[in-house]
Amino acid sequence: MNQSEGSQATTDLVSERGRITVYSCSFGQYEPFHRFALGPEGDWDNVVFTDHATLDAPGCRVVRLPEVLEGLTPKHLSRLMLAQDVRPVSGICHGTRRGHEQTWFRKHLGPQAEIVGTEISNTVTDFTHTNQWDCHEVDPVWVGAMDVVYSNSWGHAHDPQRAFAGWIGCLKPGGLLMPDHGWAYLPDHVSPIEPFGVFQTGLVKMLNRIGAGLGKVVEVINGGMQKRHQIRTVI
């Protein structure tokens, strides 16, 4: 956030992972509220953010800027792949809503990364590199053509076996399927709009079964934090 946009004061919150700057802002007729921005010395710390937001409530409005959330999975996975000299040139992110995931992957993987997103909503025309698409379906041009397929929205799948099988079929030899897992993907969090939930061990077994003969789960890594809960990615 640009401090010139009505910024009245700043407070630095220093955590073990870095520095978060809290801007107290006022815009014309609007009441003052707080915005949070990633500081220059580290990654986003969601626990510090949550604690501070809670302490300030209800006297302010907390706005979570998309840029600060880059400390979560896409940035982490990009760093991991580059550290292993894996440089994807093609990829899909399924269920990206506002298109942040493919934007972050493109930014952190480099200019060679042609990462696109899919979203079933008809709002996709508002967001770059996003196609309106049902994640259960596979475009024939994707088959065997992708270096990476990522999703943090697979809980919306009404037929997860079909969806995962399709995603695996899109991978090149050596390609990576990377679904996130965490508290929101557990069985007790299912709902009419997110009908599928499974424990991490069950997801690993499911992917190994569906991908048998084509690949297997090689590791589960820690990513960011969401509401004090660890987010992991199954690779």
Image (cartoon, helix red, strand yellow):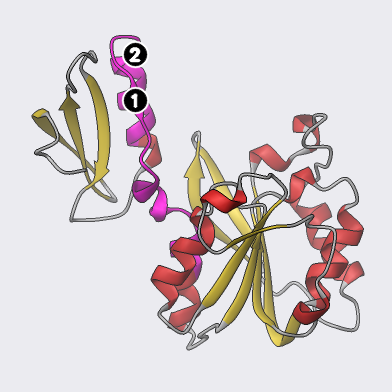
**At 21% from the left edge and 43% from the top edge, which residue is drawn?**
1
Residue 58 among those drawn in magenta: yes
- Left or right, 24 with respect to 145, comes to left
Real-space Cα distance between discs 1 and 2?
Answer: 8 Å
On residue 62, the disc is 1
Q: Position of residue 35 (x, y in %)?
A: 26, 32
N-terminal-most mark, 1 or 2 = 2
SS assignment at label 2: loop
Name the image quarter holding the C terminus.
Answer: bottom right
- Left or right, 86 with respect to 184, comes to left
- Viewer-proximal residue among 209 and 21: 21
Q: Position of residue 38 (x, y in %)?
A: 26, 47
Is label 1 in contact with label 2 (beta carbons under 8 Å)? yes
Q: Magenta span: helix, strand or loop, mainly? A: helix
Residue 108 among those drawn in magenta: no
Query: What type is the residue that disc 2 sits on?
Result: Ala
Q: Quadrant of residue 162?
A: bottom right
Query: What type is the residue that disc 1 sits on?
Result: Val
- Left or right, 148 with respect to 194, comes to left
Q: Position of residue 129 (x, y in %)?
A: 55, 64
**From what the image shows, is residue 213 above or below residue 65?**
below
Q: Which residues are magenta?
A: 48-77
**From what the image shows, is residue 63 above or below residue 118?**
above
- Viewer-proximal residue among 13 and 131: 131
**At 32% from the left edge and 35% from the top edge, which residue is drawn?**
48
On residue 57, the disc is 2
**At 35% from the left edge and 41% from the top edge, which residue is drawn?**
65
